[in-house]
Image (spheres, grey):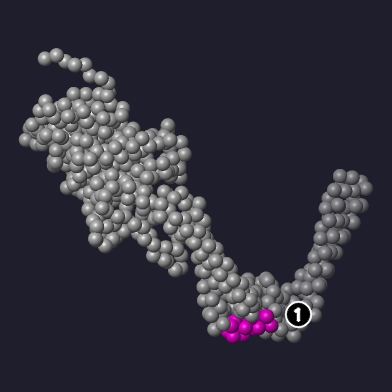
Amino acid sequence: MLTELTVENLAIVEHARLEPAPGLTALSGETGAGKSLLVGALTLLTGGRAELDAIRTGESRARLEARFQVGPGHRALVLLDSWGIPCEDGEIVVRREVAREGRSRAWVNQASVTVAALAELGALLLEVHGQHEHQHLLHADRQRDVLDRWADLGDERRECARAFAGWRAASEARAKFAEESARAAAEADAWAFAHEELERAELQPGEDEELASRLARLRHAGKLTQALARARDALDGGALHGTAEAERALREAAQVDPSLNALAEELATAKLTLTESLRAVESALDPEALDPGEAEAAEARHALLERLLRRHHRTLPELIAYRDELAARLARVENAGSERTRLAEAEREARAALDAAAKALGRGRRAAARRLEPALAKELSALGLAQAKLAVTFEPLDPPAAHGAEKLELQFAPNPGEAARPLAKIASGGELSRVMLALETLLAEADGVATLLFDEVDAGIGGAVARAVGERLAALARVRQVLCVTHLPVIAAQAHRQFRISKTPAGSRTVAVVDRVEGEARVEEVARMLAGDAATATTRRQAEELLALRKDSPLRAPRKKVST
């Protein structure tokens, strides 16, 4: 619930602080005193659009702050947790600044957020039922949500949304396959030609590097042979023979000086190394390894690889992968019929599941609508709309959407003999507020936003109807926090707490002042609402009587007779 609202430099409000009651809070005051500014402040704090001309003249910025208290597990806490914003003891502090240069900034619990994020959070904390642009009831999706909440169709809605997602995924998979199949059929011949060419080439990983090394050797066979021959002759005729002779000499010397044995061993190791080197050089000089026929074959293979690499603009590893990919594509083309059948069957099954889920949801909605219409008629009659009719209409949707297989709309006929038309096109502000009040009264026990703000709910009513509106607001306030901007004393008297908004001169300026009225001050305010500024003893007595009618009013206690 809203525990505190602070407004600075908003139009004629220089500084105002409001602490609403947990139940019903009334905001009263003369026309133009600034009541709408408090409504506007709450709208801004829940993501509404900021107007620069709303900033108080002579000030650079307007500052707004609201404190909300929510219980464990509240949807707002879940949202804040997903944003990584901490929340201690369930208190959510929302701040917003609107600067004259056009910049708007917002914070939630000291963390900076976007205005869009503020709107998402605000929708979980506060509902404003006032001017048309703030009344969600005008939107078809909101009307659908109201009926579903009242009928407790949350499970059916989730199942329908799940089935819709499954059908859409199956439909997209079938459409994508059909598109790919058509493209594949058109390119199948080219794929087959390319695959056959690459398959005949018998490409092997790494063969391009190996072939480059072989060609370098084969292309310089003469030079290579001469160098290897010199190396062989040097090893066989000099180095190896000299090393062997040196080893034998050291072995003889070691008989006299044993310390020379280590050096003799090193020469023995060197002799073995030279022997292995000689064998390797002689192997490299093998005439078969430098066969001219091999050079011709290697050149031909190299030319083939170069041609394939250039034609397909790929490296050898990429070309091998492309060959395998072409094989897979051709296999899919060959098996397209069976895959097409499988995907079509999956789509049919998903559509059947969606139709079944949407049908179950639709049955629940129609049954709920039959119960809701008479219940609403009873509430509307008590709220001064006895001749009005509110009906729920359904327009089929094919295919079903995530929210069901019908478009739902509230049709409203305010007077007998008039054709029912969409609520958004025919209801006045006061009528719409009362319709919303009737719905919220019926929805009082459903899970919803904890704080409701009603503006214009008393437009065009009085007498018994006004009393009924006040009683319903008070009843709604037993399960929700309700703020009501009102001009009617019979409604204000039902409130658990009342604030008076008034204008007062401040030097050459005018400021709006927000005062909590209690005791005699509240009696005076209700009396003013009854008779204007010319309150009399009679209107004060009437005000006391109205305040005493509230069930928890302290004025219900017997009053002592005062002698005159």
Q: Residue at x 24, y 38 (%)?
A: 467
In what quadrant of the picture does the C terminus appear?
A: top left
Query: Residue 19 appears at what percent x and percent y?
Result: 28, 31
- Residue type at mark 1 is Leu
Residue numbers of the magenta segment: 187-200
As rendered, which of 405 and 210 lies closer to the eye?
405
Q: Secondary structure at mark 1?
A: helix
Q: Is residue 317 magenta?
A: no
Q: Is residue 355 visible?
A: yes
Q: Quadrant of residue 76?
A: top left
Q: Is residue 343 visible?
A: no
Query: Residue 205 appears at what percent x and percent y?
Result: 68, 71
8 left or right, relative to 345: left
Q: Residue at x 67, y 71 (%)?
A: 206
Farthest left residue in view: 508
113 left or right, relative to 523: right
Query: Residue 108 appears at what percent x and percent y?
Result: 36, 40
Q: Is residue 195 magenta?
A: yes
- The residue that mark 1 highlights is 290
Q: Residue at x 86, y 52 (%)?
A: 264
Pointer 1: residues within 10 angstroms few (<14), some, or many (20+)? many
Q: Is the residue 203 above or below the residue 124 in the image?
A: below
Q: Residue at x 15, y 35 (%)?
A: 529
Q: Is the residue 532 above or below the residue 219 in the image?
A: above
In what quadrant of the picture does the N terminus appear?
A: top left
